[in-house]
Amino acid sequence: MKSLQITDWCHEIFERFVPAGGVYIDATMGQGQDTLFLCRLAGEEGQVWAFDIQGKALELTRELLEREGMDKRARLILCGHEHMDRYLEPERVDGICFNFGYLPGGDHRIATQAETSVVAVEQGLRLLKPGGVMSLCIYSGGDTGFEERDALLAFLRELPSRQYTVIQTPYYNRSGHPPLPVFVFRQK
């Protein structure tokens, strides 16, 4: 059995519902683990676009992809996720990964924000193909507070149910404020 960490759980859902060899976005590159996962899923035929506002995230991701021989499969873009639509056309993307919060091991003062994150999710939904999947790993409490989590959940709650299925799968028996995995499936 694989780990049940939030990112592993999101990867499991992607492997089940997103076609291999497609077009994917890592909207919050961080240390590159989702980018690497998506590069493997993309194979030789697919494409991966990864975004982050921090040069350190780009550096860490580039190093990871080079070590793993996947550096030719991804476009790493130093840009906020709220600008994804500048790089991709609507209904072109099979899957999008988000990890909200801050760069692990990085400056906790630099974190995703409610305003730009909601815009990014809204844009991501327009970029998704019918049948596409979006995963959101929402970290709250501690340094990041609850504003972003609450804004994202409020936005997702209002999505039309005939176009999207939104599934929230909280960790039920973890203390504190465990991360919240949310999945959005665009109807075909």
Image (tube, helix red, strand yellow):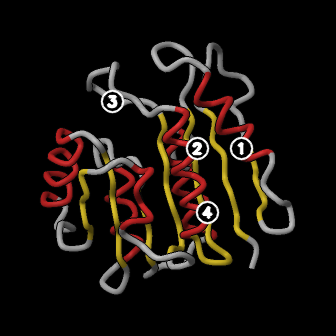
For disc 3, the neighbor class at 10 Å (few under 14, some 14 to 19, many from 20) is few
- As helix, strand or loop, the secondary structure at mark 4 comes to helix
Residue 98 percent location from the top left of the image? 49, 48
Inter-mark Cα distance, 4 to 2: 11 Å
In the picture, residue 23 is in which quadrant? bottom left
| Residue at which label 1 appears | 155
Badge 4 or badge 1: first in the primary sequence: 4
Badge 1 or badge 3: first in the primary sequence: 3
Inter-mark Cα distance, 4 to 1: 12 Å
Residue 94 percent location from the top left of the image? 54, 74
At label 4, the amino acid type is Leu
Label 4 with label 2: CB-CB less than 8 Å: no
* Closer mark to the observer between disc 3 and disc 4: 4
| Residue at which label 2 appears | 118
At label 1, the amino acid type is Phe
Inter-mark Cα distance, 3 to 2: 21 Å
Inter-mark Cα distance, 1 to 3: 26 Å
| Residue at which label 4 appears | 125
Q: Nearer the viewer, residue 49 or 44?
A: 49
* Closer mark to the observer between disc 1 and disc 3: 1
| Residue at which label 3 appears | 104
Residue 156 percent location from the top left of the image? 73, 47
Residue at horizontal 78 percent and vertical 60 percent from the top = 165
